[in-house]
Amino acid sequence: MKRFAIVVLCFSIPFVFGCSTIDVAVNKRVDLTKKLNKIAVFPFQIRQGQWGDEFSDAITHHLFKSGRVEVVEREAMQKILKEQNLSMTGIVDDSNAARLGKLLGADVIITGRGSCLSDNTTGGKEQKNLIDTFSLKAISVETGSLLVTVRKEPGIAWAWWARMKWCCSLSLIWDRNDLLIETSRYDEIARQIAGRIVEAISQIEKAQ
């Protein structure tokens, strides 16, 4: 019983001191006539960082890995953007997202922007692959409406493995700063965000 109580307490600690910093809002009232099968993820704007395209590639990878949606290839996006005289970085806003999506044959366009996290354990030096804050929009190509918004706030993006590390070590091996760094890596954030997007799209389609 004591061991069980310790495990329960450890898993409750992250909830007491802060849940996941990733929040999702879903528009279930949008009126669609077709499935949301194909997604185009455009390069993101990351303030003080030049790796927004790598982050968008990571989200594209995890969306594809889910096996539940198609994704538009980068080469196809590059071709369309070149034809439209647009850059691959920070070019999509709400006003032209639907138009570009139609040219790409996509059902959903994803855009986003965020900021880097500085690792204070290395004297505040900026780390290439750490996400501090991030905002994402998933826009319907058919209607131009917002389908999903995702917000990553500062702090630990608690995942099951992070809870396990915190629990098993009782914070003696991995402290909160360790978990902050590990859960802020852009591939981990991309994995969590992609999962939330797939879930949200399923909710929207069920509501139709």
Image (cartoon, rainbow, N blue to C red):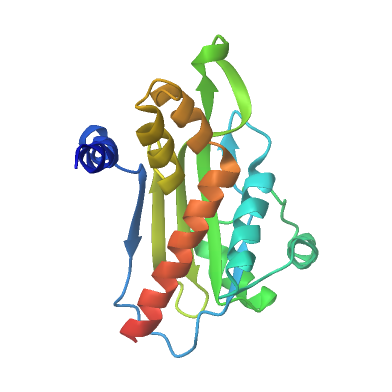
- Closer to us: 114 or 16: 16
Q: Is residue 172 visible?
A: yes
Taking the image as shown, residue 50 lies to the left or right of residue 145, namely right
Residue drawn at point x = 53 percent, y = 22 percent: 118
Which of these two is toward me, 111 or 38?
38
Q: Quadrant of residue 14?
A: top left
Whether residue 102 is situated above or below residue 23 in the rendered picture: below
Residue that appears at 64% across and 67% down: 64
- The residue sitting at the bottom extreme is 33
Asked if residue 91 can be seen in this view, the reply is: no
> Percent x, y for residue 57?
67, 53
Position in image of residue 127 (x %, y %): 61, 25
Relative image position of residue 40 (x, y in whole percent) = 62, 66
Q: Residue at x 56, y 80 (%)?
A: 37
- The quadrant of the image that shows the N terminus is top left
Residue drawn at x 26%, y 38% is 3
